[in-house]
Amino acid sequence: MTTGRPEGLFPLFADLTGLDGIGPKTALIFGQMGVEKPRDLLFTLPHSGIDRQRRDSIRDVDPPAVVTVEVEVGRHFPPASRGRPYRIEVTDSQTTFHLVFFHAREDYLTRLLPTGQRRIVSGRVELFDGIAQMVHPDHVLAPDEAEEIAPYEPVYPLTSGLTQKIMARAVAAALERTTSMGEWIDPGVMQREGWPDWQAALKTAHAPGTAADLSTDAPARRRLAYDELLAHQLTLALARVERKRKRGIVSRATGTLQRKVLNALPYHPTAAQERAIGEITDDMARPERMNRLLQGDVGSGKTVVAFMALLVAVEAGGQGVMMAPTEILARQHLEGLQPLAEQAGVVLELLTGRDKGSERAAKLAALAAGDIQVLVGTHAVFQKDVVFCDLRLAVVDEQHRFGVRQRLELGAKGQGADVLVMTATPIPRSLALAQYGDMDVSVLDEKPPGRKPVKTALIGTTRIDEVVASLRRAVGEGRQAYWVCPLVEESESVDLTSAEDRFRRLRAALGDDVVGLVHGQMPPADKDAAMSRFVAGQTSVLVATTVIEVGVNVPNASIMVIERAESFGLAQLHQLRGRVGRGTAESTCLLLYQAPLGESGRRRLEILRQTEDGFRIAEEDLAMRGAGDLIGHAQSGLPRFRVADLERQGALMNLAQSDARKLLHDDPGLTTPRGCAARHLLWLMEQDKAIRLISVG
Ligand code: ADP
Ligand code: MG
């Protein structure tokens, strides 16, 4: 069997200019819309269609509307002066109207539409001063060429310089180059879904008969979407198998340290926490490398689960490391975990970018000697000269602040070390599968008991004085509050101005000692100081940019004010709100918005009022905003799908994942006929990474 690209696919991966009617210039324009080879044209599907069924007369429709009718060409009226249009009178079976052309050449029009001849014209009819006219018909044909007009004409996405005609021709030429291929989809799935084979699906998708054929539910479209998702999941499944094949480290828990810590905790772990701890402990005991995602909403108690996992590494005689996305969070982890570590007699240290000189050198030496058992820190823990004695587990907290690439880097650091990634961003299952399909997942789907719901209210900015007044009362009662400043165009400096401005105003209203400020551009030491004054209760109100978004834990804070809430993503608002409701007090979240709030803007914020279920919020957010927006493509490493629509076809992703994993399980070498077909699919979908894996395997 060959490992190179299958010959049948060569024509689809050749130069675009090889297609009829595409020269180098047009090819360049196609390139601007990401279409570089005939293959790309196949997966550029029409987004809508135009009904071009023949009618007897334009009288049958309400203008403006696209109409296709047979007419007899009447008199020509060349423009009376420059800038005026050229008009041609035409008559269908019932009425007379005008064809209108701007900047047209007379000789061209007399050839195209000779007086006295019959023509089929198709275009948009509109009323101009009460008279029906068709400006620049899309089609003008002799009656015997009529079948060249499809009764339902596909409309493609274009870029400037392209026309529907060029596109349709190019697509038709690309379709010509396809050959029938072996089926890569499970026969059971094909049958149950009633899907056409690949070639037939392409033909149907490019020649819709009605609007229903354009829907994401149409079988041909679903099949093509599934192809994309299956290729993606096959890649992830191959990566997963590959990783499992590499040797990991066996870290067997003795339970001694875990028990000491559990006894010292003021609470019992939830059932979900226990389950996750069990899954992780089992994974770590296996010879394969662990690659696990711990997903849990804000406040679900991920930290203690991670610590238990780190203790397994220590119990087994090794070391563990936990990386947080910010200095503040790293410090907070250290402070929270230090007492527990002391109970267990475990040596815990902090390493951040601020460690310099001899102090840093001493820490590195202790780490290399194995005297530090658990290291907590920022990215600094993965600098080149940081060497562990026996690293067995790396935990990454709040994953979405790191890219997928960093996740891979981290894996490379400890030879065979287990990896646990934690995320507090509840993401819909389809996206989780797209992004983390290569990982095993533990979910904390239960919150620690005793949490009171957070009261959430929407308030117009015009009422900000009332908000400040009630804040004054709350502060008087010893409560603490966060005040989050608007996210303006994601620019730090603008954020900064608004935060500093708010800080000054709140100080003036509430008193200088009462209000603190923290933002991303503050010198780190100042940031820490502001943070710890708030944690210690020395300040009651903390004005912040979104640096507090992830992970910060101040149980006494029970009020969250978010300015310009409409400019934040729902998931982000949910994260911010999760900062309160952690203590015993009744908590409030005030979403300040700038009126007028549009219909959809209000609906979005209403969802937050209705539910605190992060997963539901994430699903709604996905439905409203789209997948790319939700995670941000660049940083997520989420593939761009040309056909698949994760918002509407998310369920297909589940199917693709189980199908892919099962295929690799049954046919690990991809050598059966279906396995070979799956290889073709990977080539077709340009899954280079997967192709490298199957080539070596
Ligand atoms: P997150 O999942 O957002 O990282 P944390 O680990 O910071 O959540 O936990 C949030 C708070 O809940 C902490 O104060 C922690 O001590 C507390 N907590 C964690 N697990 C439990 C539990 N089982 N019962 C009660 N409180 C818990
Ligand atoms: Mg956390």
Image: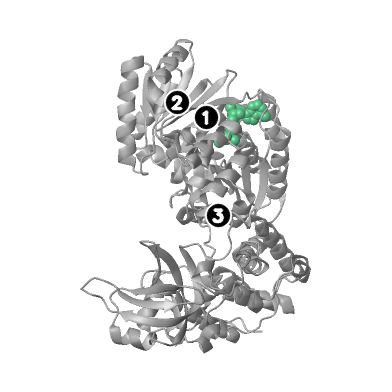
Q: CA distance from mark 1 to mark 3?
A: 30 Å
> Is residue 165 among what the camera can see?
yes
Sequence-first tag of 1 and 3: 3
The three-letter amino acid code for the residue at tag 2 is: Tyr
The secondary structure type at the circle numbered 3 is: helix
Marks 1/3 in contact by CB < 8 Å: the verdict is no
Protein image colouring: one colour
Label 2 near ligand 1 (CB < 8 Å): no
Q: Residue furthest top?
A: 476
Q: Mark 1 — residue?
A: 579
Q: CA distance from mark 3 to mark 2?
A: 36 Å
Q: Mark 2 — residue?
A: 482
Q: Residue furthest left?
A: 82
- Whether 107 is drawn above or below 681: the answer is below
The secondary structure type at the circle numbered 1 is: loop
The secondary structure type at the circle numbered 2 is: strand
Label 1 near ligand 1 (CB < 8 Å): no
Labels 3, 2: front one = 2
Q: Residue furthest front?
A: 94
Q: Where is residue 303 shown, x and y percent of the image?
A: 59, 35
**Label 3 neighbourhood size at 10 Å, few (<14), some (14-19), many (20+)?**
many
The three-letter amino acid code for the residue at tag 3 is: Gly
**Label 2 neighbourhood size at 10 Å, few (<14), some (14-19), many (20+)?**
many
Q: Which residue is at the front of the view, 258 or 361?
A: 258
> Is residue 44 among what the camera can see?
no
- Whether 396 is drawn above or below 91: the answer is above
Q: Where is residue 673 shown, x and y percent of the image?
A: 73, 79
Q: Mark 3 — residue?
A: 411
